[in-house]
Image (cartoon, rainbow, N blue to C red):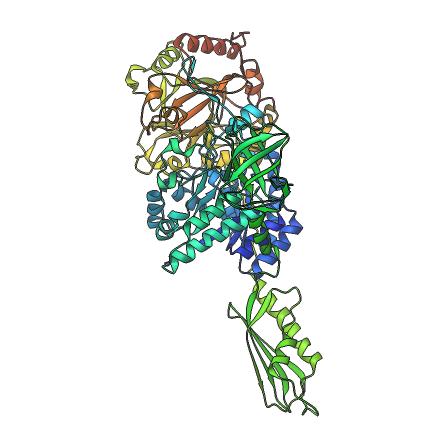
Amino acid sequence: MKRPEILAPVGTKEAFIAAINAGANAVFLAGQKFGARAYLANFSIEEIKEMVLYAHLRDVLLFVTINTLTFDNEIESLLTFTDELVRCNVDALIVQDLGLIGLLTKRYPNTEIHASTQVNAHNIHHVKFLKELGVKRVILARETSIETIKKIKEEVDIDIEVFIHGALCVSFSGNCLFSSMINKRSGNRGECAQSCRLNYQLIKDKTPISDEAYLLSTKDLMTLDYLNELIDAGVDSLKIEGRMRKYTYVTQVVLSYKHAIEAHMNHKQLAFEQEVDRLKRVFNREFTKGYMFHEIPKDINNDFRPNHMGVLIGKVIDYKEKRVYVRLTESFQVGDGYRLIGDKDYGNVLFNLKIGQTSIEKAKPNDVVNFEVKEEIAVGSDCYKTTDSNLENELDVYLDENYSLIPLSIEVSAFVGMPLIIKVKDNRHNEVYKIGTQVLEEAKKNVMTAEEVKNEVNRFGRSPFFIDSFEFITDNQTFVPIKVLNDLRRDAIIELTELRLNQPGKEIVSDEMSSGFKDVDQAHLVVKVHTLDQLEAAYALGITEIYYDDVLEVNENNYPKATLFKVLKRIIEDNQDYKDDPKVVLNEIGSLGNKQTTKEMIGDEFLNVTNIHTANLVSTYGIKRVTLSSELSYERLKHFTTSYERVYKREPNLELIVYGYKDLMISKYCPVAKNFGYKPNCKLCFKNQYYLQDRQHGKFAMINDGNCNMRIMDSKPLVLLSYLPDILACGINTLRLDFTLESKKETQDIIKAYQLKFQGIESVLTINKISTGRFLG
């Protein structure tokens, strides 16, 4: 049975040291650019170089995240940055951008490239495609089931990494534009504003049917009691989310999962309740086993609060004169953090604590304590401990750089007439011999004992070693010069350290690149439809190229004057076949890997094409035209075609969405089913139109993708009507109108307006509220 790697998140130097001391086998972190936590300080190249040495000396791997989408003007500086990382001997780069994956796997032939969870690999076809690209490890989407994980490990020879603990995105990763479109902060660029952690109200048609609540906020993943299934499935790496968390969180999570692994490997019982209690104290939004272990989607949500819950420790029984009185169910002491939740939410750090009029430092269960608060608190409010100062003090020991030391076996040999010899062996079976330059003489007074020699040798300073076994071989007559002994020990440790850090040099290779595009379309409008009424409207107005959602049953023979493409689902489970349709629009990489089954393919926007290298990569897999990401501004679009031509020596075939309610996210979780307490496939969303309404009264429509995954649409349509000439001047010849919620009449009016504008005739649309998305920046 293979022991899996524990992979810990590192956002600070303290978390880095603590993670290693607690038993992490690998850590992941970001540099100061291109990481998915743009608002974290992250680490400089110099710091990363030092951290690599520190980690490697202790048998710990270090990975660096490059898990954001990249723009063309960033590619040169990104490659300079990744070159520096490779020269630092990092063990792997974690990458989201498909174009970058294609570049980096060729550029660094002996540095591992790992596919980020942002790639949204959730079936075996995705994994096979990524392996073909040269990826050495795939970090699966959090929605991937344990059965699919087992199948992948059985059928594909590649490392698999899964998230086992921490925050969950409510959207399939890499498929969320919510923060980008609403707050101008891209989740795909590490800038997520966490719109999903805000309050929303559920609307049925036009009627509110719920109070305001955190309807999209997920619980935290916790799989401690399912770890045996992951180990038995052959998962290579168990990943902990939380680069923005405190070191105490990182430490405790590593410890708990290390204990669980050891219990399973040694066929022992885990102190499960104790471990879960400690995990709750460092951070929890309530826990879920996640989709990996078939959590019902409605139970993935915690609509009560979007941040740390802590643990319940008592109830408010009185409030008077700015003091709250709490009957405790567990200990509580000065220095703890607390939160009082009732008709309001109030939290602070406990600075004073009393029983009656007597000040105390610590209280026990059943005590009635009182402490000062700045707001009136309702009787009956719950008291939660959000910071456990005792636990934090206990975890502080893992901040000591000398906490985790490397065991050495040392042998010292001293005989009259022979030179002094020291032999040092480490836990990797590295051996170093050091021999003195002068022969030893007979002692004139007392000879050194073995204990005295060991004490002299046991002086490693800041080096991370300790003597695990020691032997002094001597004739008991020899004088041992202390200086010679210390010099030999120092030289042996230096050589041993160099042996432990000695790695094969990392290669950096430049590669010629060729284009995959064959033809470029003439300028034209295309239409994507979600209903048959929209299809009829588009066809009647002479649209010659129409995409239709595969939830529709369409007889293509009824539309002989148009070329019809079926839009494949973005989420395709392993038990669903890739259909051999002659003309398709695709959003996911598994369809690319199945290119031999289709005749004509168009790449849709959730292939996340934000740079010329991603556009080219997908074109080499048979894509005839690529839809550019909606996260590209006009300033970036202006240079896209010319940049592509400069590098790949031919013109690309590009498409851009210029109208439509944007897909903000797609999720296995459904607020409608949650509200009514139903299980998946309740089909309520087919009977009525449901919306999420935010505090600004924006209404975000929800649409079922046909597989009971919920698409959440923007509250305002993207309208780029007035910018059509500018877009065409960028070399983007295919402009798409994307219809979802519109009636037949609305569809007709919108198409007519765009047709007129396309012909150079001024036209206007009468839509109350519109969006320009990220087009203007």
| In this picture, residue 584 sits left or right of residue 695 | left
Q: Is residue 71 visible?
A: no
Total labels: the figure holds 0
Residue 540 is situated, as x and y percent measured from the top left of the image, at 37, 9
Q: Nearer the viewer, residue 680 or 551?
A: 680
Q: Is residue 663 visible?
A: yes
Residue 209 is situated, as x and y percent measured from the top left of the image, at 41, 18
Quarter of the image containing the N terminus?
bottom left
Residue found 55% across the figure and 7% down from its top: 762
Residue 385 is situated, as x and y percent measured from the top left of the image, at 54, 40
| In this picture, residue 154 sits left or right of residue 259 | left
Picture quadrant where residue 772 is located: top right
Quarter of the image containing the C terminus?
top right
Residue found 36% across the figure and 14% down from its top: 535
Residue 555 is situated, as x and y percent measured from the top left of the image, at 28, 18
Q: Nearer the viewer, residue 739 or 265?
A: 265
Say if 84 sits above or below 711 in the image. below
Residue found 57% across the figure and 50% down from its top: 390
| In this picture, residue 152 sits left or right of residue 374 | left
